[in-house]
Amino acid sequence: MANPEDPNAPVPPKPPAPAAGAGAAKPAEKSAAAPATQAKATTAPAPKSAAPAAASAKEVSEPDPNQLRRRLTWTCIVAFLSANLLMFMRFFFPRALFEPSTICNLGYPSDYVLGVSDRFKQECRIYVVREPTQIFAIFAKCTHLGCTPDWKPAENKFKCPCHGSGYTPEGINFEGPAPRPMDRAHVELNAEGQIIADKARLFMWDRSKGGRDEFNDPGAFIPV
């Protein structure tokens, strides 16, 4: 065994220095742990921000009164302008009234037998009457207040359902408040030999005022 005090004794070798990687391991671990701690510290106050987020969501869900007021105002303005535009455009279209035709085709004279026919009461408001020498068309309008008299075959007369006025088969008033006979429509034969009645051209006889009897005028009947 060598004497340590001997100057000639051999010098023992020094232990090898630690590797560079081994010395840096602890600082690396320390630096890696630092971000984790920092992240933990950063994410910790998250529950405190939940209340402001809920408040902002509530503000978004509630409508703005001013915005609703503006929408309502613009809706009223658009509706007003649209109505005025339609009224303005209405002047470009004619205001025509489409009334039913006053012309009625009553068929051939041979279609009727002696007496009163109510075939065209509903369609034309006409009663066709055939006598031995003529055919005429009575306009079924009571001369009292304009109701439509009914033909009563069993009683052989026209009877107004409104106020009880009665007329003979020729349309002559004889009872009730009717002041005069029912009018007769203009009748003529067309090219095919059919009877054409025109309710716009009426023949009347106002006996109460001394009026002339128009029932014998041309057009008031068709001779047969």
Image (cartoon, rainbow, N blue to C red):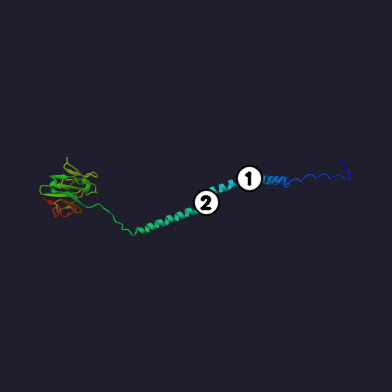
**Upstream in sequence: badge 1 or badge 2:** 1
Residue nearer the viewer, 96 or 127:
96
Residue nearer the viewer, 193 or 103:
193
- Estimate the x, y position of residue 32 in percent, counting from the top left: 68, 46
Query: Can the viewer see residue 141?
Result: no
Above or below: residue 94 compared with residue 161: below
Between marks 1 and 2 in the image, the one whose residue lies nearer the viewer: 1
Whether label 1 touches label 2, CB < 8 Å: no
Above or below: residue 219 compared with residue 48: below
- Residue at which label 2 appears: 65
Q: Secondary structure at mark 2?
A: helix
- Estimate the x, y position of residue 206 in percent, counting from the top left: 18, 52
Q: Amino acid at mark 2?
A: Pro
Horizontal side of 91 relative to 116 (left or right) equals right
- Estimate the x, y position of residue 3 in percent, counting from the top left: 88, 42
Residue nearer the viewer, 79 or 30:
30
Q: Secondary structure at mark 1?
A: helix
Q: Amino acid at mark 1?
A: Ala
Residue at (52% x, 51% y) in the render:
65
| Mark 2 burial class by Cα count in 10 Å: few <14, some 14-19, many 20+ | few
- Residue at which label 1 appears: 46
- Estimate the x, y position of residue 86 in percent, counting from the top left: 37, 57
Horizontal side of 84 relative to 203 (left or right) equals right
Q: CA distance from mark 1 to mark 2?
A: 33 Å
Query: Can the viewer see residue 109?
Result: yes
| Mark 1 burial class by Cα count in 10 Å: few <14, some 14-19, many 20+ | few
